[in-house]
Image: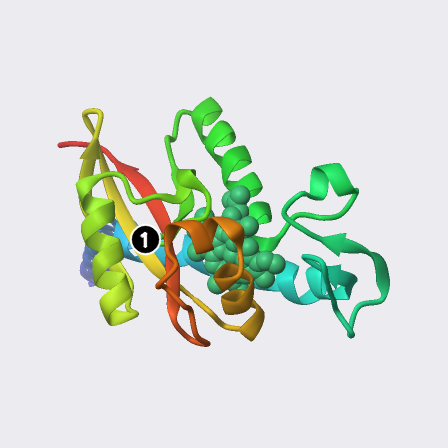
Amino acid sequence: MNNIIQRFKTRTLGLIALAITICFTAIACSGGSATQAEGGISPEVAVDYVHTVLLADRTAYTKHVVSRFKTLEGKDNPKGVISAEATEGWEETGGIPLPAQMFRLGSEVAAETAEEKGIGFTYNLISTWNINDSHAPKSEFEKTAIEEVNNTGEPYKGYQEIGGQKFFSAVYPDKAVAESCASCHNTHPVHLERYPDKVFKLDDVMGGIIINLPIESS
Ligand code: HEC
């Protein structure tokens, strides 16, 4: 009798152990496949993360560094506390770079680092009304994207191929969030020469931030 109970217990325990094993395997497997299906960040979301960081740095630099200088591109900055200037010719005048220049300097460092790491990721400013030629829309994707962003004020995302490499690219609007964005561009000699009819107003789309994530072709 004892023997039978013993065998029953062993078998039950064996069954329970088996059930637990199956359960664990099922959970582990479903977890595993879920990780593959959902855990990998989609390029649509990855560009949003990158854009959030870029915009945060650009805004923080403008708000907490540039605005503390007494002169901003030749004009008095009443809120400034540091006797120096944020100006396009900062290297010659001993001042500090404008926000757009700071952004470009950062993007150059990032491009170099990305190349060293072999991840080929880039970002840049682009605009239909660019002061700096390196911000002109170049590829077909960039031309279409910036037109859409100018018209809608919304981000534009899609795939493009450059030199045989496939990219997921996104252009986010860069808007005149302050009066000084518009006034500095409107009165800039290059702007006046190239786009005399384009007068930016507060909240206008002035250009875009483009992010290019390389995608492995399958
Ligand atoms: C004091 C002058 C000044 C102010 C203020 C200013 N910009 Fe610019 N911006 C420039 C100059 C100069 C460039 C070109 C810099 C370069 O890359 O050499 C530029 C570049 C840009 C570009 C890239 C396209 C281009 O023209 O080359 C965008 C987009 C842009 N600025 C948007 C803005 C926005 C938005 C603001 C406000 C948050 C702003 N700018 C404030 C002077 C200014």
Closer-to-camera residue (193/160): 193
Q: Of the residues shown, which amino acid type is indicated by label 1?
A: Thr
Q: How is the image coloured?
A: rainbow
Closer-to-camera residue (104/72): 72
In the displayed structure image, the side of residue 161 where residue 190 appears, left or right: right
Residue 92: image x %, image y %? 74, 37
Tag 1 secondary structure: loop
**Screen quadrant of the C terminus:** top left
Closer-to-camera residue (69/160): 69
Q: Which residue is mark 1?
A: 128
Q: Is residue 106 above or below residue 41?
A: above
Q: Is residue 62 above or below residue 161?
A: below
Q: Residue furthest left?
A: 218
Q: Is residue 53 above or below residue 63?
A: above
* Residue 6 visible, this orientation: no
- Residue beneath the point at 25% across and 46% down: 142
Residue 74: image x %, image y %? 71, 58
In the displayed structure image, the side of residue 62 where residue 79 appears, left or right: right
Residue 130: image x %, image y %? 40, 49
In the displayed structure image, the side of residue 142 where residue 113 appears, left or right: right
* Residue 61 visible, this orientation: yes
